[in-house]
Image (tube, grey):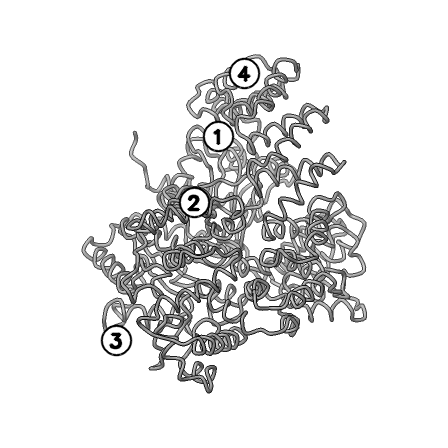
Amino acid sequence: MARPSYGAATQSRSRILFTALLDYANEELEVDEHSIDVLRPQIQTHWKCDRRLIVRTKVRFLEALTKRIDSPLTADQIKESLRRFEDFLGILEDNRPNRSGSEVWHFTLNFWHSRFDRSANLQQFDQAWEMARLPQTKPELINSWVQICRDSLEAQNYQRLTTNPLTITDGFSFDVHELYVPLGIVERQEEEEERIFSIAEFLNQLGSKQRIAIVGEPGAGKTTLLQQIATWLIDQNALPIWISLADLQGETLEQYLLNTWLKQATRKISVSVELQESFAEQFRTGKVWLLLDAIDEMAIEASVALTSIARQLRGWISDAHVVLTCRSNVWDNGKNSLESFTTYQNLSFREQTGEFIDRWFQKKSELGDRLKQELNKPERKRVRDAVRNPLRLALMCRSWSLTQGTLPSTKSTLYQQFVETIYAWKQDYFPTTPAQRQQLNHALGQVALRALTQSKTRFRLPYSFLQQAFGEALDLMPLALQLGWLNQVATLNGEKIYAFYHSSFQEYFAAQAIDNWQFFFDNYLIFQSHWREVIFLWLGRTDLEIDQKESFIQALIEFDDRCGGFYSHRAFFLATSGLSEFPQSEKLDEILTKLIEYRFGSKTLAPVREAARIALLQTDRQSAIAVLEQFVSSTPDLFARWSAAYTLGKTLDHGNHFAIQAMIDLLNEIDNTTLQLNICDQLEKINPGNSVAFETINSILKTTESETLQRKAAYILGKNKLDLEKSISTLENLIHSTQNPTLRLQAAENLNALDSTNTIALSVLNSLPTKTKPTSTKPSKALQLERTIATLEQRLAQTTDPINQRRLAYRLATLSPGHQSAIDTLLSLLLQPLPTLHKKIVENLKDVLLEEQLPIVVDRLKEASESIEVYKLLWYCSERMNYPLFDRAWNQEHSQP
């Protein structure tokens, strides 16, 4: 194999492709627009954020692009440039699940500066290339920083399990490696088909990922996965730096790194400028990984926290790779300034539950076996669902080892049981009376609730705050520390900082302190994401009157927002999710029936349907399964039955027999062969190896004369591993026999996906001609930002063509954030009868609107909310505005632009 070249010629060719992609995606190519429009379907681009460009295309179309700018590159030169982007500059992330033999290139290109700062990006390209060619830092210096990071992690006891603070006093504790059970990891994306990564696959692709977020519910294993990443990075001689974000306490990342972490890691009272420069140099080499744990625990509002971190990842810090963890309700709530991060989540325990129990009870296997037997009883299905969460399963294991008592049924009762168990277990060490326990629980509830209502002290509690919060019960604080409910986690300016041993328990104690459901309607806490867990835990309390909970559920489902129903829907879906902790509600059937209508009804608008989809996954699972089984068995709407059966059988209850039978019945009721193949494909995902699906696909292959259907049937047969040999032979025959070049290409791509080494597929994919002609137009030149804005303003004022108005206004708003004339133009176009443009306009507005402009948008568009695209934009605004602000904008007198 030839040795890779990094010389001037390779740099020049790579720069041409880099520039072409940047200008093409920014619509700045100074060429005939029609010639570029021809390529638009073939070179698909999407700006995930200001510096991250997603590209999906094939090499031959990139060839055509370079010819159009009069700087033609060959296919081999383009492939070489793409490889140098990845392995030399480290700016390309390959998103293809299978690289071998694939003609399709799907990648993310990371720029150093804003997409519109062309000259800065090109200058940085040249500098980065030259920097990469320089001799590497001396090994001994690298090794010293590796050791510093390794020692720092060890000092932070980064492999400590979350449960250890409550178990350590009697010598009962684990390291991560003793209990860690690898879970599947999935990238969160809009497409229904998600790729599941093993922990090994996930870790092995980390090198190309610069911005990663791990999201999930409390106790889902986010921190544990971050610990695994830290261990892996150390083994790779990278430089991982662990920061618990709650410890920032008002400091910026830069201040914390230089003033706190660097001193602690090097064990110096003060650090010299030279040491700080050496530290910053490690960032510039790209070897530093910032591991930022629990963005949701920062001492600021959740939405502000995301924006704050985004702003701090600039300057010399921006050269670091970043992996952060965050609760999903915070990550998904409103406008996310970190939306450019590639987002992953752990899958819940399924069959791994037994393995985890075996590891926990490795020295008392009989005890673990009895727990597994109890959990496997049919009547324990609800509790099995509850402990698919790693933290909750660990709590259950500990409770079981101490009491071997009854199993809880909800999250709230699980925490309650564990609290009671802790007191009984530690009675020999720290004896307490029932009265003391009651007093301490009450005091902890007041402390937890007061902290959650004050963003500056939400999860990190200074001693001075605890003195005030405990009040007259301050003498109980030592007991809280002895029992492990509170733990010292830091010292700030000489003052000790404390935290509940896990944020979930802080929320549990806070929920115990709330006596009346009206509390959640004060200041509209029902619409604030960080109160959702408290609400759910409150609903799960066993000491509350049922009428209290019923009244709260009733208030949620009857909430009238008086502003278009956007917040009424949110309140309803909160009630739906809350049923997971209160499945005894007399409103359950009524609520779930309405939820099913929202989720699968043909008249439901897209944002409501998506919110219903999420709520269906969060509500009481057993009740949802029962309602869905009834729905798929009774609805006359074929497509609603199809969608509901697939959700039931694949997501809620894999392999559900009602879902399988419904899909089989649909095969007999639907005559359309294409739809039958789609049903068979989904049926295989629900029930692999289903004989009816197999026979139907084979029957279609034998009887259809349509080459398109033959190709589709053969591919489904192969990708579901029903008959790989027949699938491959059918596709090979189609490639040889068809006269349709598009079909031949599709068959080759399918065949390549099934067998990346298949020579027939590779022959087709590598021999397709390029049907483009070069032009003599020269590449575009950089313009000063002010001049560009002025030119765009002039062109926008002169043009009357709606298509050009949209394009120019969007371009102007991206260059000049909040540009009022551009925003007004887009809003005006949205109110005109231009249905073919509306979807694109809404996408543009979501990209460029500033938070302070959202009330104006609501005011301008409220009278057109019956339009589907307008409704989507208003829903977007409602997710990013607090309820009182949206209400004022909706109900004020309409103002003209």
Give the distance between the C-alpha atoms of the residues marked 2 and 3, in whole angstroms.
58 Å
- Judged by depth in the image, the label closer to the viewer, 1 or 2, is 2
- Residue 351 quadrant: top left
For label 3, the residue is: 270
Where disc 4 sits, the SS reads helix
**In this figure, what is the number of numbered marks?**
4
Give the distance between the C-alpha atoms of the residues marked 2 and 4, in whole angstroms.
48 Å
Question: Vertical placement of 627 versus 507: above or below?
Answer: above
Q: Amino acid at mark 2?
A: Gln
Q: Amino acid at mark 4?
A: Thr
- Across and down, in percent, residue 616 comes to 62, 49
For label 1, the residue is: 103
For label 2, the residue is: 373
Q: Earlier in the sequence, mark 3 or mark 1?
A: 1
x 26%, y 51%: residue: 237
820 on left or right of 502: right
**Between 576 and 698, the one nearer to me in the picture:** 576
